[in-house]
């Protein structure tokens, strides 16, 4: 799907890592929350509370999940999952557009 219909969008942006990651929270009609954003080229560490699925819309990155030694490459059109109460390193190789699905 290329868009979310019948949603609420929180007006204030979520700005992380000195502006290297900017997203907006989207609330679907059933109350489900998602985050839609962009990560500029950088290497960052994200912590998770709830499990997440990172849907990559455009761009390229490498990801190393907590406890792993290997990096895995991902690109637009792919998704990766991250367990709750965990973390992952992400190196964005070019501007990355994403949707984060929580829970």
Image (cartoon, rainbow, N blue to C red):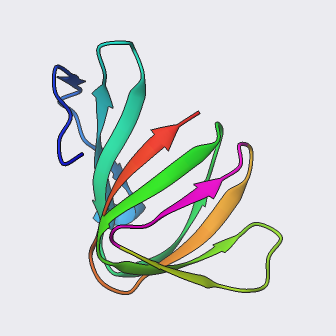
Q: Is residue 79 magenta?
A: yes
Left or right, 77 with respect to 73, comes to left
Which percent across, then down, holds residue 48? 63, 47
Residue at 43%, 47% (x, y): give it.
100
User: In the orientation shown, which residue stands out farthest toward the right?
Assistant: 67
Left or right, 83 with respect to 53, comes to right
Left or right, 7 with respect to 16, comes to left
Q: Nearer the viewer, residue 44 or 31?
A: 31
The N terminus sits in image quarter: top left
Q: Quadrant of residue 33?
A: top left
Which percent across, then down, holds residue 80? 55, 61
Q: Nearer the viewer, residue 29 or 25?
A: 29
Residue at 38%, 35% (x, y): give it.
34
Q: Nearer the viewer, residue 97 or 17?
A: 97
Start-end of magenta stretch: 76-84
Residue at 39%, 14% (x, y): give it.
31
Left or right, 90 with respect to 34, comes to right
């Amino acid at each position: 799907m290329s868009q979310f219909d019948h949603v609420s969008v929180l007006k204030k942006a979520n700005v992380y890592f000195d502006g290297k990651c900017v997203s907006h929270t989207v609330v679907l009609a059933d109350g489900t929350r998602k985050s839609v954003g962009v990560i500029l080229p950088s290497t960052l560490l994200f912590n998770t509370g709830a499990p997440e699925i990172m849907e990559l819309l455009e761009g390229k990155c490498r990801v190393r999940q907590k406890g792993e030694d290997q990096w895995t490459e991902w690109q637009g059109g792919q998704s990766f999952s991250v367990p709750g109460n965990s973390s992952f390193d992400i190196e964005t190789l070019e501007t990355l557009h994403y949707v984060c699905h929580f829970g």
